[in-house]
Image (cartoon, rainbow, N blue to C red):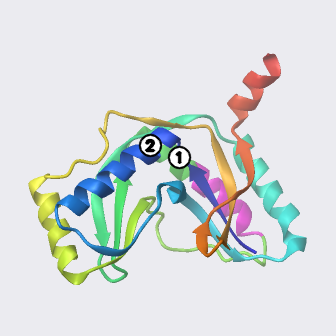
Amino acid sequence: MRLFFGVDVTSDIRSELAGVQSRLQEQGVKAGNWSRPELFHLTLLFIGETREEHLETLLAIGKETARQASTFSLNFGRLGVFERNRILWVGLQNDGGMEALRQVYDVITGLAAKQPFIKVDERPYSPHLTLARKLEAASISRVKEVMANESVSVPDPARAFPVSSICLFASKQVSGRLAYPIVERFYFEDVNAASMKL
């Protein structure tokens, strides 16, 4: 099975991002594959094809990463394009929330690097939510115009969304469509501590 660690987003954030997609389409941006709202997420660590025997190790990595983290909030940044791969994305503000996310990334990749079956990407971590893939060539220029004119706004930067867990996701085809079912959710230490007091 294909697995990855990531951050799930709430239903209201999914709705807001779907609205961004609609406004971009109204501005003439065309793509071969617009991400369905239920697929929105922030990738932390891509694992890839994984044997069943390694699942317990991954669950332990997720649990330990969450144990070292506390709830934080993220704010949306700007739209962007990976031109070579023709991917349209929305980024995050480089603030305290981003720093907390990077700390989670550092912990999980540090733990993963000790496992011979995991290859950790050595490129700098650049978290983003993918809005569309296979952008048409003309649409890359159109997105740049939209960005320059600020004619399509991303969700309000002041509209922070909380992160209180990470997830181990599977990547699979369900009825001919890509799906990212959650294998396990790992709540951060402060969430677990609060629940124990109830």
What's drawn in magenta, residue-wise?
A: 104-114
Q: Residue furthest top?
A: 198
Give 134 or 65, whichever is nearer the viewer. Answer: 134
Horizontal relation, residue 102 to residue 50: left or right: left
**Is 109 a magenta residue?**
yes
The answer to whether one can see residue 94 in this image is no
Which image quadrant for residue 180? Answer: bottom right
**Is 95 a magenta residue?**
no
The x and y percentages for residue 189 are 72, 34
Give 149 or 99, whichever is nearer the viewer. Answer: 149
- Number of residues whose C-alpha sits closer than 10 Å to that of mark 1, classed few (under 14), some (14–19) or many (20 or more): some
Disc 2 residue type?
A: Ile
The answer to whether one can see residue 128 in this image is yes
What residue is shown at x 29% (from left), y 55% (from top)?
22
Which image quadrant for residue 146? Answer: bottom left
**From the image, which quarter does the N terminus lie in?**
bottom right
Horizontal relation, residue 146 to residue 92: left or right: left
Q: Say if 95 sits above or below 135 in the image.
A: above
Q: Which mark is residue 13?
A: 2
- Number of residues whose C-alpha sits closer than 10 Å to that of mark 2, classed few (under 14), some (14–19) or many (20 or more): some
> Do tag 2 and tag 1 residues touch (Cβ < 8 Å)?
yes
Q: Residue furthest left?
A: 149
Disc 1 residue type?
A: Val
Magenta stretch: dominant SS? helix
The x and y percentages for residue 79 are 28, 58
Q: Say if 190 sits above or below 150 in the image.
A: above
- Give the SS element for disc 2: helix
Q: Which residue is mark 1?
A: 9
